[in-house]
Each structure stands twice: as C-alpha cells, then as structure tokens.
Amino acid sequence: MMRIVKGNEAAAIAAKLAKPDVVAAYPITPSTDFPEKIAEYVANGELPHTQFIPVESEHSAMSACIGASAAGARACTATSSQGLELMHEMLFIASGMRLPIVLYNANRALSAPINIWCDHQDSISARDTGWIQFYGENNQEALDLMLMSFRIAEDPRVLLPAMTCIDAFICTHTFEPVDIPSQEEVDAFLPPYKPTHVKLDPDEPMTLGPFGVPEYYQEMRYAQHLAMKNAEKVIDEVFEDFERRFGRKYSKVSPYMVEDAEIVLITLGSVSGTTKEFIDKMRKEGKKIGMVKLTVLRPFPFRELIPLIKNARVVATLERNISLGYGGAIYADLAGTLINEEKRPLLIDFILGLGGRDITFNDLEEIVKVCEKLIRGERMERPVWIGVKKELVT
Amino acid sequence: MKIEPGGAIKEPGSSVAYKTGGWRTFKPVIDAEKCISCWICVGFCPDAAIKKTEKGKPPIIDYDYCKGCGICANECPKNAIEMIFEEK
C-alpha cells in the first residue's frame, strides 16, 4: 500500500511491522516522531504485545534494550546526535554481548555549537562500536533497511546489533510516497527472534556479560569480527530475498554511470539523489562522471567497491563528517581499500554539508573542478572544504 | 572451554576452569626441612591454593591457582617459603 509519510514514520512503520517485544526510547529532534508513533501504536492496540518504555535518557534507552534483548526479546530504539553519543558506551555492550538490537538514527550534527540539522558525525563517531551500519537515501529505504536490519542482525551467523541512518530533516521530516508491505508479507519475511546464545531464563540459568580476562577478551573481539564478516554474506542473502518478495533491489554499493567514468563520487545518504541528477546534467555536457552510493558502511564493502572504482582517474568522497586533524572518514576507509591494488585512482575527500548546510549543484561543480585539476597533475592539500566562508573565520 | 557468542556462561563453575596460576611471576617453594606444619600459610592464602597435609609434612601448593602474591612467604614464622622467579 502506498502512503505519503515522513522518514521518521516510515522507520516507525517498519518497527511496527517487525512486532518488537520492547521499544525503549527517549525523544530527541529530529527522530522524535519514532517513539511518538510507537507510543501511539501501543496505545491504540496496533502493537498488543509490545512494551514501550519511555526512559529518562538515551543511556537508559540502550540499557533497557540490552536487558530486554538479553531476556530474548526483539528490542529496538531510535535516537540522533547527542542521544547516540550518550548511549555510546552501551553501544559497545550491545555488540559485545551479541544482542541484535535495532536502532534508527536520524543523522544530525553534534554540539558544540548546538545544531539540529543534518550531518553524519553522530553515526560516523559510532562506526567502531561493532554495530552494522546502513545508510538510507530516502524514506522508502528508511522503511526497507529498518525491516531488513532485524533479520540480518538476528541471523544466527551474525547476532550483532544494527543501525539504520537517515538524514535529518532532508528525509526524517520530508513527506514522500512509501510502499508499505502488508503484515502477512512481513511475517513471512521476518520470523520471530528465538535466541539460544543468550536468554535470561530462571529455568535455564546462565551468566551474561562476565569478566573477559586477557586469555579470552581478544577471542571475543575476534568472534565479533568474524560475525561482521559473516554479515557480508547474510546482507546479500537478505537483500536478495527482500527483492524476491517485495520487488525492491538493494545492494551494499550502488554504482551509477561508473563504467567509463573518469571521476567517481562516493556518497552516503540523501545526497545520492542530488548527485545522480547532477551526473545526468554533467553527462549531457560530455563529462565522464559516475557515482557509487554506499548503503552499508560496516561491514565495509571492500570486495564490491574495488572493481567499481579502480579504473577511475579520481575518486572523490563527499563527507558530511570530519575527523578533525585528519579529514573525511570515508576517505580513510577507501584509502585502506585501494592501497594494495596495483592499479588505483587518485583519492580526495571533500568536507561539505555539515550542520545542515545544503549540498547543491554548485558545490558538486566545484568538486568536479578540483578533481579535474588533480587529473591535470595539480596537487593540493586535503581535505578540501567546500562552501566554507573563510572570511568569517578568525 | 569454548566461548559462546557474547561470552555467556552456561555451565556453572567457570572460575575453577580458569587457571589463575598463569598470572604468577614468583613461585613459592616450601623447604620441607624448615616447615613445622603450623598451617599459617594455609589460612593466609587469599586464593585457598595451599592445602593442609598431616603433621610433620609440609602443605601442598596448588600452582594452578597460586598467583604468586607472596603472602605465604611473608607470614611463614620459620621463613620456610622462598619466592623464586619463574621463567616462562
């Protein structure tokens, strides 16, 4: 059924269709609609078996999800920005205890200065917490990726938590047509969660979250890394099954006009739509530009990415994040991906669209000009900042 | 002992399976000639790693769990316990 919904509601509908046992969440702009909608579904009887816990902080939200998941419940939550940071230490507990909690994150800039608008610094800062990370381009992807993340996270070969990241306001508060699957279709796609590795049960007691002494700690991290590697395969399987059932195709990396591209732009999230239109315009002008959208950031899709970008002259990452004193996070991942390839493109990172600044065709044109300079042999300091009013900076 | 995903412990008694003797740097060694079987070391051992035997014989140190803290050597009224550096 097609409906016109906000990105937040699309994610909440996905959570509703997954019939979670527990949702524990604390409201924060711009993801507040999510807990509001869940509270509404619980209150009006649409989720008769869901316990909604309105906790007093995001740290408690993740803690409650951890407790619920450890008791064998399907648990999910939503947050954004400072909220994700406040639950940061608990994100490690969730992944370390191998609890397949599902989180919806509205990508919002971090304080200071306080800012409620879009960038990716929040989830990029949570990149190494051991969570699977999906980035959606639009509201349909918000719903679909949330739905798939339950099945991927709960797969016995994976058992890792997963977050779906959606751009603040650009998607969370924009109304778009979204195809909503029926409950029967979702029930057939997503079986109930039945864990055996952890379950708080008085009839079958077990110790959870024990001390990890030096003789065992490294093995547990290794096991998590193997689970991430398993997730690569499971993600592909679930994407394929989803396409078979619902007709919408997903892949970890989505190329657009890369076959003959001299310049390939790497995108995450909503800017992918803008970039595709920009490429259409550039192609009419005869410029060989392509794009690869990353839908999955962890596990990092090395294998799929290399053949798509290795023949380009320049690969440019569009970074709505900054590792201060270094540059863009995706640049670092890509550099590591390509460094041992015999044939590899030049690589450069562009910092733009921070704190909700729009990314426009003018910005993308500037990026292409810098890439063309690189092709001509010019070299410059990186990262390159796009659209910064340098005259304002003291 | 295999590790469950997430490290859950399903069988009780895992602290017995974990041999803390591996932490040891200095190993207590009892001189049977000097030992008077007073069992003071047995009472002081924080890991209950020293077992009584019978009068006239020295106690037995369980090196699987002795962490080499040296309290036994410190408390022995006859200086019958020597801490010896253990090469690994």
Image (spheres, rainbow, N blue to C red):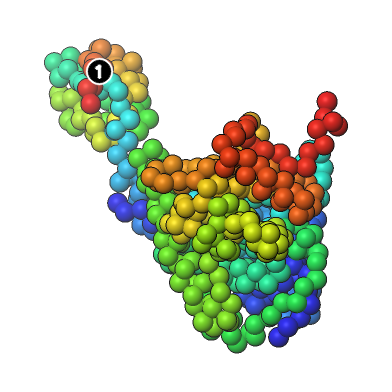
Q: Is residue B88 left or right of residue A369?
A: left
Front residue of A208 and B50 = A208
Would residue A208 be visible to someone looking at this image?
Answer: no
Viewer-nearest residue: B41 or A382 = A382
A50 or A202: nearer the eye?
A50
* Circle 1 chain: B
Image coords of residue A349 (percent x, y): 62, 42
- The quadrant in which the N terminus of chain A is found is bottom right
Q: Percent x, y for residue A163?
A: 61, 59
Residue at image point 77% right, 73% down: A176
The 10 Å Cα crowd at callout 1, few under 14, some 14 to 19, many 20 or more, is: few
> Where B24 sits versus A200, above or below?
above
Compared across the picture, whether A234 is left or right of A357 comes to: left
Residue for badge 1: B85
Location of residue B12 (image quadrant): bottom left
In the rendered image, which quarter contains the C terminus of chain A?
top right
Q: Vertical placement of B83 versus A155: above or below?
A: above
Q: Give left or right: position of A296 versus B58.
A: right
